[in-house]
Structures are given as structure tokens and as C-alpha cells.
Image (spheres, helix red, strand yellow):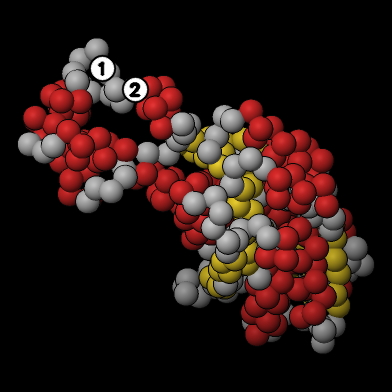
Amino acid sequence: MTSTRATLLQVAERAGVSLASTSRALHGTGASKAMVERVRAAAAELGYSVDAIGRSLRMKKTFQIAFAIADIGNPVYVEMMRGIHEVLAPHGFRVVVMTTGDTADSAAELVRSLNSGFVDGMIIVPLRTDDRLIAEIQQAPVPVVVIGRAMGDHGVSSVSTDSAAGIGAAVEHVRSCGRRRIGFLNGPLDTTPGASRQRGFDAAAGGFERVETEIADDFTVAAGLDAARRLFARASGPAEQLDAVVAANDLLAIGAIRAAREFGLAVPGDVAMTGMDDTELGRVFLPGLTSVSLGSTERGRAAAELVLGLTDDPDRAARQVAVGPELIVRESTTDGPES
């Protein structure tokens, strides 16, 4: 490790600790929080920077973990990445963000590219999964952890959540608010989230006077706006108009709120609206969006812990982590204060 401004030995002398302790603290391995803070403060004072290439060659690691997602514009992935970074950074790992594409084939090709050795592991959130993708994950030369569907049956470590139950909680919430004509705004049904959330809605939506489902082309605001326009246009008059819409994610719900306003409908006065993912965008939107939290940051942390453990011990048995959904009530379903 070299620096044009300082050496590792100088950092150790400034911090008043051994050379070995200084190295561990800078790399986030086997050092206490107080030691890390002390050594990094000394390094900052001296302008010292780690020679990442030399470190990688010496330890035969890249100290990079790939985070592969379908849509870098979706805020849910930003919250996952925050959790991943919180776990990996203290151990000296960087997060490399990549896109899987929209298909299982493109995701499989991305996993296959791990043979080039540019990362020490991958956390992947595939929208669509098939046998080829699963096989590529199983055969990958570095650890791969899946966020989304449970993969225990395939011997792959994964972090999952019960989004079907989450949609059910949203349906029961609008029912308890006195809504009787409900619509479900979902994304593509051939995706993992689309299939599970449709299943949850179908199981929970019995007993309403009217039930409608509209499938958006994607899980985006623009797709939600288009699909919600179709949903609201089906009403033949005010008495037939939906008074609640449960959306499969926050972006679809925000698009639906825009569509409701185009139809002269107030939210929540005329139509209650719920989302899923409890993103920061939904929290600051007006009205504040009632949403089902799937613990995005928590899932990111859990996946990072799994991949970190596998980089230390590639033969470690696959582990499954489940994060439960939680309904967060805000102004889009009630005129009262947030709860």
C-alpha cells in the first residue's frame, strides 16, 4: 500500500497503534469501531489513501460486490443499496451497481459474466426467474445471493418477503376505512412481484361490491398513470367509480393519484390509495402515501451479511432470511394524522 503523500507506517505512528492494527482498521477487518475511527482520522490528517490494486493482488480479492437490479431509477433499490453499503463498507468492500435487464435470459448472462472475476460476489434482484438463471446462480464462481423469491429449494442463499400478505393487509385496511369498490393496479404478471402480489389481492378481495384489476406495462409512475386511466375510465357514472385502489408498488400508486386527479377524484376523499415498498418518495409525496413496507433496507443488510459470510467461507450452507411486511398508514387513505 502506497501513497504519494504518506505511508502506512506514518499513519500507524500518528494513530499510536501497530502497523498490523492500522492495516486491519483501514480494511475493516478485525478492528474495533474506536480503532477504525482513530486510524482513519490519522489517515485523513496525513492524506493517506489505500493502494486498492496492490491490496487486491496481495489478497487475491477485488473487494467489490455487485448489486444487480432491473431498474436503477426505482427508489426501492436505493434503499436496499443503503443497507448493503452499511454492512459491506466497514469490511472494505465497494458496491458495484449493475442492471439485470428485463428478462431472465439477460439476468442469466450477467451472472455468467462473473467468470471474468471482476467482483467477489453478487446480490441480485431479478424481476423474472427461470431454470437457466437458477442454474447460472448455482454454478457461479463467486457467491450469489438473491433478493426476492425464496431459493432454499435450489440451494441458493436468499432474502424474501411475503408481499402477497402485504397486499392482503392493504386490502383489509381500505375495507376497514369503509371502501366498497376496489381496484388493483399491478405490474406484469410474469414477474416475481407481479405474480405474488396478484395472488395476495385475489385472496383478500372477496366481499367488495366491485372488484377491478388493471395490469400496467411496468412498475413505473408512467405505466401506473396509463393503467390507472384505464381503470378509472371503466366507471359509467359516479356511483360506479372505484373508491379504493391498491397498487403493487409506490410508483404505480403515485401514477394512479395523478390519474385520479385527471378524473376529478380527490385522494382520499373520493378514492383511497395504497402503495407498496414504503419508499422515501411515497413518504414525502402529497398526500403522504399509505404503503406496505417490505423492509427494503433490512433486506439489503440481510443480503449483504449473507454474501459477506459466503466470501469468507464459500462452502457455507445456503441460508434463507424472511422479512415480514408492515402496513404504514398515511394521508392517502385517511384524512386524519399519520399513524
Residue at (63, 64) in percent of width and height: 160
Query: Which amino acid, by three-letter code, is at mark 1?
Result: Ser
Query: Which amino acid, by three-letter code, is at mark 2?
Result: Asp
Q: Earlier in the sequence, mark 2 or mark 1?
A: 1
- Examine the rendered structure and indicate whether residue 36 appears above or below residue 52: below
Question: For the image shown, how many numbered marks are present on the structure?
Answer: 2
Residue at (60, 61) in percent of width and height: 318
The residues bearing labels 2 and 1 have C-alpha atoms spaced at a distance of 7 Å
Between 74 and 12, the one lying in front of the other is: 12
Q: Around disc 2, counting alpha carbons within 10 Å, would you say few (fewer than 14), some (14 to 19), or many (20 or more)?
A: few
Between 242 and 45, the one lying in front of the other is: 45
Q: Quadrant of residue 9?
A: top left
User: Residue beneath label 2, please?
Assistant: 51
Residue at (64, 28) in percent of width and height: 116
Image position, residue 198 (x, y; %):
80, 67
**72 to the left or right of 224:** left
For mark 1, give the secondary structure: loop
User: Residue beneath label 1, please?
Assistant: 3
Asked if labels 1 and 2 touch by Cβ distance under 8 angstroms, the answer is yes
